[in-house]
Image (cartoon, rainbow, N blue to C red):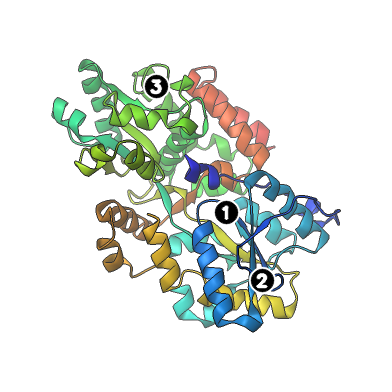
Amino acid sequence: MAPRNTHRAFFSTGAAALALTLTACGSSGRTVAGGPGGGTLVWALTGGTETTLTSSQQAWNKANPKNAVNVQFFQNDPYKQKLRTAIGAGNGPAIFENFGGGTLKDYVDAGKVADLTPELDKDAAWKGRFFPSVLKVAEVNGKNYAIPINGVQPVVLFYNKDLFAKVGAQPPKTWDDLLALVHRFKAAGIAPLSMGGASKWPDLMWLEYLTDRVGGPQVFANIAARKPGAWSDPAVLKAATMIRQLVDAGGFAKGFQSVNADTNQAEAQLFTGKAAMDLMGSWAYPVILTNAPSFVKSGKLGWAPFPTVAGGKGAPADLVGNPANFFAVSAQASAGARTTAVNYLKKGVLNDAYIGDLIKAGEVPPVNGLEGRLASAPNSGWLTYVYGMTKSAGSFQLSWDQALSSAMGDTLLTNLDRLFGGQLSPAQFCAAMDKAAE
């Protein structure tokens, strides 16, 4: 689950806290091997895109020695406090990695992030490089403050083709199809769905998709904007009710709330034939490929979009998950550093070589015009599928525990775990979240 862990929310801030001048944090980052001692400072996370960014820095600095960049990498836990402290004190990096959404908005509201909208608007080729649904995640009040730097990670419904063939079924296209499959698989002695409920965050994927399918993306937009009573929106209440319907029908493998997602137990249930389906982010594909290569290479692994809901307002192509990680430019950087930063983002990030490195690593960049390159890549069927579904998405919702503050995200996961476990009714869940939001 390293990709999911890498892409989890890693800092929590508020505009007021960021405005404070804080003392410097002692933890230090790891500079790229061969990187300059000086240059425009870039802070990024270890893992994931680290190798790609290392190559990008080295190529950029060779071509632009007078405008070098200095990339430093940090592990998640040290990064969150160090970034907050440095930006609050006015001595942060010129470029810093983030997830967009609510965490980026806090920095924007505090006046700490440069508006990239003028640069994007005057460079149509640069702006047109990215999927609009992904670029929108870094939009605050109609302005763009960051650009994507790595691959998309939508949540999809993985399924075991052998088990589906055993009961003579096709992957579900609607919610009613899914409920019917629950009964068919249970009758055959097969767990319909695996899930790592002990980790809590996999529960969230069901609430996100069902809320979107029922009410459309505006429902969560209202939640993120802290509109009073937003958690009691009829779409959220219905989504919570549908979750209970699925749990009560025996949709999940026995003991699912004791299964640890971080040790890939849910995926193991899928490829060992103990469960028929697994709703999980695209990061599960390399996990399954690594642990059960023959299962994937023999064509036994299938994938499908999340089912539609009859009468729902959400588009069938809407996605949830992790659209990308982003680079933002500090508003506190000097004029020269900001110029270098913008030029590096335009020409050194997600250029042809950078994209090639991501594809080699099995990532799907949110960049237009990659159909041919993905079709010739290893595991092209999977990569092309993820690329196509992301490109056609009108809405790509950032995982709610990342889009919200860390405190609200933790409360959400706790209450959602209680909803799945039957300790909260759907109405009680909505009421508890509204109370927390107050």
Label 3 CA crowd tier, 10 Å (few <14, some 14–19, many 20+): some
Q: Are marks 1 and 3 in contact (CB under 8 Å)?
A: no
The residue sitting at 80% across, 57% down in the picture is 88
**Viewer-side residue, 262 vs 89:** 262
Mark 2 element type: loop
In the image, which is nearer the foreground, mark 1 or mark 3?
A: 1
**Residue 427 visible in the snapshot:** no
Q: Which residue is mark 1?
A: 99
Instruction: Kindly identify which residue carries mark 2.
Output: 36
Task: Tell me: residue 7, above or below residue 295.
Answer: below
Q: CA distance from mark 1 to mark 3?
A: 31 Å
Answer with left or right where residue 287 lies relative to residue 149.
left
- Mark 3 sits on what residue? 247
Of the image marks 2 and 3, the number of the one nearer the N terminus: 2
Name the image quarter holding residue 9.
top right
On the image, the x and y values in percent for residue 367 come to: 40, 66
